[in-house]
């Protein structure tokens, strides 16, 4: 898997987690302390998420970073 494919996978997993909680991008971005455009770019796989951002997202979603990376079963 190359970097672009990994960004896309992580973005899809973040979007699934957000939608499973009936959150809007605006709600997630407010919780994350980032702009909605930033969150949108991550969800589309056009921007990578830093380790800090992944940790914060996992905390917001009450899940593991592994699940955001696609490693959880």
Image (tube, helix red, strand yellow):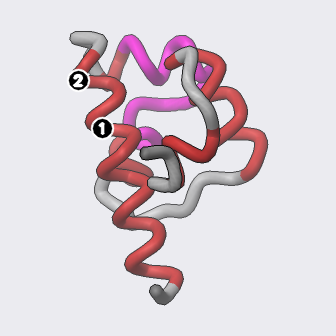
Establish if 57 lies above or below 1.
above
Establish if 58 lies above or below 31.
below
- Residue at image position (55%, 13%) is 31
* Residue 67 drawn at (x, y percent): 51, 42
- Apparent side of residue 9 relative to residue 20 in the rendered image (left or right): right
Look at the image and tell me in which quarter the C terminus lies. top left
- Apparent side of residue 65 relative to residue 38 in the rendered image (left or right): right
The residue at which mark 1 appears reads as 15
- Residue at image position (27%, 35%) is 16
Prevailing SS of the magenta stretch? helix
Establish if 20 lies above or below 11.
above
- Residue at image position (77%, 41%) is 52
* Residue 15 drawn at (x, y percent): 30, 38
Q: Residue furthest right?
A: 52
Marks 2 and 1: CB-CB under 8 Å?
A: yes
- State the residue in front, 43 or 37: 43
* Residue 17 drawn at (x, y percent): 35, 28
- Residue at image position (43%, 80%) is 4
Q: Residue furthest front?
A: 73
- State the residue in front, 28 or 13: 13
Circle 2 SS class: helix
Other residues around mark 2 within 10 Å, as few (<14) / some (14–19) / many (≥20): few
Tell me the CA gap for discs 2 and 1: 6 Å
Q: Quadrant of residue 53?
A: top right
Other residues around mark 1 within 10 Å, as few (<14) / some (14–19) / many (≥20): many
* Residue 8 colored in magenta in the image: no
- Apparent side of residue 46 relative to residue 58 in the rendered image (left or right): left
Name the disc covering residue 19, or none. Answer: 2
Q: Quadrant of residue 7?
A: bottom left
- State the residue in front, 34 or 58: 58
Span of residues in magenta: 27-39
């Amino acid at each position: 898997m190359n970097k672009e494919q990994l960004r896309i996978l992580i973005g899809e997993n973040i979007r699934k987690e957000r939608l499973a909680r009936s959150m809007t991008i605006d709600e997630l971005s407010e919780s994350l302390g980032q702009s909605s455009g930033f969150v949108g770019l991550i969800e589309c796989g056009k921007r990578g998420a830093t380790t800090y951002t992944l940790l914060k997202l996992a905390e917001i979603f009450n899940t593991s970073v592994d699940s955001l990376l696609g490693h959880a079963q």
